[in-house]
Amino acid sequence: MPQSQPEPAHDAIRFLLDGELVELANVDPTRTVLQYLREDKLRLGSKEGCAEGDCGACTVVVAETAAAGGLRLRAINSCIQFLATLDGKMLFTVESLQKPGGELHPVQQALVDCHGSQCGFCTPGFVMSLFALFKNSAAPERREIDAALAGNLCRCTGYRPIITAAERMYGYAANGATRWLDQPNTCNEEPRDEELQMTARLKEIRRSRALRLDSKGRQFYAPRSLDDLAALVLQFPQAVLLAGGTDVGLWVTKQHRQLETIIYTGQVSALKRIARSASYIEIGAAVTVTDAMPVITDEYPELQEVFERFASPPIRNAATLGGNVSNGSPIGDSMPPLLALGATLVLRKGERNREIPLDEFYLGYQEKALEPGEFVESLRLPKRTSDLQLACYKISKRFDQDISAVCVAIALQLDAGKVTDIRIACGGMAAIPKRAEHCEAALRGQEWSEPAISNVLSELDKDFSPISDMRASDQYRRVVCKNLLLRFHAETSGAVVSVYDYGR
Amino acid sequence: MTMGADKNRRDVPIRGAVGSALPHDSAHLHVSGAALYTDDIAEPRNLLHIALGMSTRPHARIHNLDLSKVLAAAGVVEVLTAEDIPGKNDFGPVIADDPILAPGLVQFVGQPMFAVAADTVEQARRAARLAVIEYEDLDAILDLDEAVAAKSFVLPSEKLQRGDSGAAISAATHSVSGRVRLGGQDQFYLEGQIAMAVPREGGDLYVYSSTQHPGEVQHTVAAALGKQNKDVIVECRRMGGAFGGKESQPAQIACIAALVAARTGRAAKLRLDRDADMIMTGKRHDFVIDYNVGFNDEGEIEGCEFTFASRCGMSADLSGAINDRTMFHSDNAYYLKNITIVSHRCKTNTVSNTAFRGFGGPQGMFAIEYVIDDIAACLGKDPLDVRRRNFYGTTDRNVTPYQQTIEDNIIGEIVDQLERTADYRKRRAELQNYNENSRWLKRGIALTPVKFGISFTATHLNQAGALLHVYTDGTVHLNHGGTEMGQGLFTKVAQVVAEELQIDIDRIKITASDTSKVPNASATAASSGSDLNGKAAQVAARTIKERLIVFAAEHYGVRRDEVRFVNNHVYVGATELTFAELAHQAWFARISLSATGFYRTPKINYNRATFSGRPFYYFAYGAAVSEVVVDVLTGEHRLLRVDVLHDCGQSLNPALDLGQIEGGFIQGAGWLTSEELCWNTDGALTTHAPSTYKIPACSDLPVDFRIAMLESHANREDTIYRSKAVGEPPLMLAISVFHAIRDAVASVGDHKSSPLLQAPATPEAILRAITRMQGGDL
């Protein structure tokens, strides 16, 4: 075992690349992992296909120590991930997998044998998403494979041979793989020697003090405690608060914006907590969507589809629920269900906390009820009430990894066939994620029947004046929003009214 | 035929023989991340990176282009405009109407006006945004209706006519007419457009270009620089996808890189980011199709008229040949006795559209299939019965509107077999029953055929060259004019050489397309890659083999027919040698071990002026059955099951051909469903990244996907090992997806009328069609 390292310098980042220590000083705060790999390391396997995290050609795998002691591996989009966020973590790229003698990894060999590559440009990204699946699952079925590959686009193969490779890759590891890399499903098993060595090395590079980078006057802060974070945000109210970076990354790669001061929330362990009280589940603002998802769907299984269709695994692995909510995009997917469920936010400014209902948080397009120096600390999701009926529908041109044209979440309480309470929240219908207050009011007290619902659908026209854009026309949004209420009614009556799961 | 000629070879085949399901030659490199694309090639010293300044107006004069801030920006070394081009400011592949950099006039949003070169790509891209530009806006034509009304065309309209369609329609028992809009499609190759130009001594340039057409890039770069073809070499080892989008478009990218390199003396790279790529390079043409058809009680077409208006954009590019192919494929597999096809090639102030897999054919086929569905709805018949009724005959009713006699028609056989294996009739009955009992979800099914003409319609392009060296250790260096974009061309051609020389494919080095090895090659396009380059390589291999036979017979004193090449060995009478030993002996005896091969497609002849002759050497056939379920409340759909039967002749490589069929099908399904190109009222494309432009994702592949190749059907024509071209035809199998959706929508109105469904069938388009069936309006 290597000697324990002294506390790392606060102005240099340290991470493991294939288990080897990399220490980098003077890192540009907005240099992406992909730029580092391609331009500095000449690891040319990872590709830039879109520079926005939508095609997956840049996919790499990041490992961190899991709560159970082993390594947890997650695919991410290196094109929009800032290098500085790798501090204290471990990185694997497509170049990591091949054995020293040149023998291919099971994932790679399966892809070759199943003819899973044609032009090959997307292939390294697929390899890494499949590698993450390989390590996180033992025998995925088609649906799990689809979900794991939702963030990787292939224009040549039509996906069939890649899916076949995903099914067969485990067969290549069957004969007692000796390398940890070649062993499947390790994320769900007790860590063994090689893995324990790596977690030990990760522990060695863990820092206790904040990271602070200064690159030509541009600052990057990665505080570790909530108090430090609060103090920094108060000190630099104009700073960019960086969480998963799946939106901020695009400001740099697409808009070529120069970000002067960045405060990264991803190293604040207190923000990654999930806690439960008698009446709510509290999810820290830096909890990733991937980690929040099972907690939420455990309480509300009806939200499985919307979270399964929330961006893609590499995006969900980086993006945080707090980031999605704080960003407040009118077409973000977490807000409609959270609004319908009456979630609240805990805001923090300096040493002060306050709690506000989510539906009071959005004031206008890109305008939130946040004071300068204030940030979202956590989200409180009410626990399920016994008679709640819930649905969340997302309509888009493509099922996976698309942005909603319309997203409608409905939470309904009935008593003897009458509506005692209903909350309808929509995305894509206004400049903010917004509740349909007129329609809700008109439905309260009504009989829960198709004629009664049809009667009040026109109230939605008072609630929303949607726009036309490349995702849908205003008329389509209006009509579909109404029709989704009819779908919900039909489903509460036992009908199957969605093609999403049809035949799968 | 050579294949199977030697009995011994069958016992111990070489690795990579023709017909074997070998993986792609680069598969190992692909999966390990070691395959080098243009952006991965080792960068020369002092490389400059280029970004482009693009027009924000659809049609305007540039009054003042103030680049002082661009020049002053950090890292900027050079800024070029049209005035800095020493040679010809044009990259038009057919006619000279495509400026490399806009010369004082911009004609679409996104047109490059200047290039900025800097030390890093970020510096170049940031600087490109600093230009201050004064425009004088001119009237812009942004859509097809406007263009047709204004007679705004890039090329003259064309008409193809047989018989008297007007009289036939008037006399027919039934007629229907209508208009349908068919959207375009972005190629969305994963690797964006890129070129790197490296200066060499004496003003020569070496250009790495991601291109399907290195020869054209070479010629265009030379002309732009005021140099000669001999001064420029273009190389391309592989592309990260192309699909037609890298046929004519890369010349512009390479020219700009070359201009910077020539001007600065430094190597220069231009890599478009995804948005720039989608905004400034051409796509599949969108169409407005007007149709009018007369038919009898059986659904047999008596007369048919099409008027096609296609969006060519601001220049002609390849639109002439593309729209010709639309005209040639608006018969698809059907005999149209009386037919009039009018084709308008519209000039609009949008990006100039270009080649995309199918090259206009899909739009023509879409039109006639749409019409057939209308006929079936009108008569209350199963569309399959109407289709079959109108199929070309084999001995009569077998002449196309362009006067080519179809000699290889197998569509009836394919459709009969597929109808059976896909259980079409039974499933249709089940669907009917389902739909009667399902209020919100409706299912639909359709079987559509494909007949696709193989050859460049411009006869002169149907030629290819190859270059083959055999070294003294018996290994082989293979080069030909084709390019590798993922389709597996390099693998297939290497298989041909392996088969001819009877050596393992591992002994053959597949090398980058290179204009200094094979000159004046045609684009790798029109599905012709294997047909042309496979034959050329075969000629080269046979030339060397013949020299070896002559040498061996003489050297060992045996008859020539006693020299046999079998499994890496050569039997010379009773003597057994390895191929390597013979190669070495031949070298020692001063026998040339290098040869070129050349091939031109026989039989084709075609008169463009009269639209008649034999433009196609042969046809490739296929058919597909698709089944979908549609949500009546939202217009969402899911593709449930696909059955395909496709004709690859005698496949050179069944694994690669299967890949083309599957991939082509899904790409076609994307074109007709989720992939929607949107422009705003200012003429700007709003779907220019994968966040807004949705190609199929993994879960869009139907759970039940049954793809089969037609067996025991060698090509009637003497193609390379009797195989058939497979690059483009399968894309059009996906027309069945669109018609399955249309069938589901029709069930909303109990199949009493044919829904007006526009393509792509997005949820909104489908809901609009449903609403109209219900008598409403969305």
Image (spheres, coloured by chain):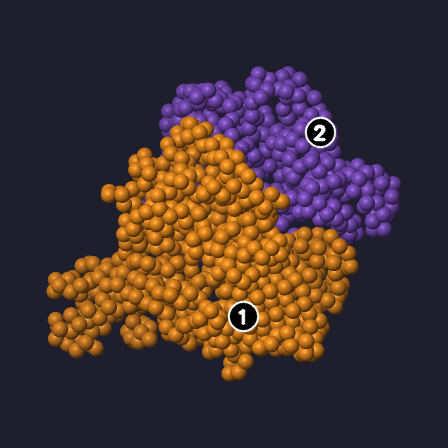
Left or right, B307 with respect to B104, comes to right
**Chain that is purple in the image:** A
Amino acid at circle 1: Leu
The picture places residue B154, in percent across and down from the top left corner, at: 51, 56
Closest to the observer, B75 or A336: B75
| Secondary structure category for the residue under label 2 | strand
The residue depicted at 78 percent of the width and 39 percent of the height is A463
Amino acid at circle 2: Leu
> Is the same chain shared between marks 1 and 2?
no
Closest to the observer, B501 or B302: B302
Q: Dividing the picture into quarters, in which one does residue B176 lie?
A: bottom right
The picture places residue B345, in percent across and down from the top left corner, at: 54, 59
Above or below, B334 relative to A60: below
Closest to the observer, A430 or B112: B112
Query: Of the numbered discs in the image, which one, if any, rests on residue B160?
Result: 1
The picture places residue A142, in percent across and down from the top left corner, at: 56, 53
The picture places residue B39, in percent across and down from the top left corner, at: 38, 43
Which of discs 1 and 2 lies nearer the camera? The answer is: 1
Which colour represents chain B? orange
The residue depicted at 72 percent of the width and 64 percent of the height is B747
Query: Of the numbered discs in the image, which one, if any, rests on residue B36?
Result: none
Q: Which residue is mark 2?
A: A363
| Secondary structure category for the residue under label 1 | strand
The residue depicted at 24 percent of the width and 70 percent of the height is B565
